[in-house]
Image: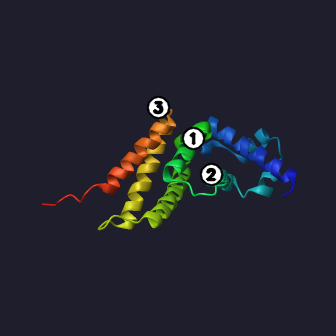
Amino acid sequence: MDRRVLKTRKAIMEAFVGLLEERDFEQMTINDIADRANVNRGTIYLHYTDKFDLLDRCIETYLQQLVEACMNDHFQTPLTAKDALLRTFGYLEEHAAIYTMLLTKEGIPAFRGKLMTLMIQGVEEQMNACGVQGGMSKEITTQFLASAAVGLVEWWIMNAMPYPVEEMVDQLIALLELHLSLPALAVK
């Protein structure tokens, strides 16, 4: 792709994110974004359909960056679940400002939804690799684990990361192991 196109898209995205930090999405206009990015309004429409398309692409970009940062890119052996979680929490801590804004900003529930979809895919991959305890529904277990993990990440970010990355990962793994190894409770 042409460097000028990349530079323009980067300027538009940065302007958009900067405006999201200052005001609600609904109040933002294409003119606001164009002014902040120092581009013509028409230039934005060359790259994005409207501000909703820009929001979707912004969310996809930051989720993709999260995935790429946490993937097993240059190691010969696959990552353990703990290593993947350490990378994920570490990346979120390093880029806290943007992910805090995306998770906490009203008008952007799409980010949490897409994060949940991403987490479900990851949990499904782990479940396919490790299996499910006898008598447990794979679908219910996947939804439970993904919801718990996303909820924990959201809580951690929204509360200014009160625990270090390593402790969060150790606690999350302990909770997951506890859930997955509990004997079935007798129903009376």
Q: Residue at x 44, y 44 (%)?
A: 152
Q: Nearer the viewer, residue 96 or 125?
A: 125
Instruction: Give me the disc on residue 59.
Output: 2
- Which type of secondary structure does the marked residue at label 1 adopt? helix
Amino acid type, mark 3:
Pro
Q: Is residue 182 left or right of residue 106?
A: left
CA distance for labels 2 and 1: 19 Å
**Residue 23 in view here:** no
Residue at x 87%, y 56% (from the top left corner): 2
Can I make out residue 148 in this image?
Answer: yes
Q: Nearer the viewer, residue 102 or 27?
A: 102
Residue 71: x %, y % from top left: 61, 54
SS label for mark 2: helix
Which mark is nearer the camera, 2 or 1? 1
Residue type marked 2:
Ile
Q: Residues within 10 Å of mark 3 (few under 14, many from 20)?
A: few
Under mark 1, the amino acid is: Gly
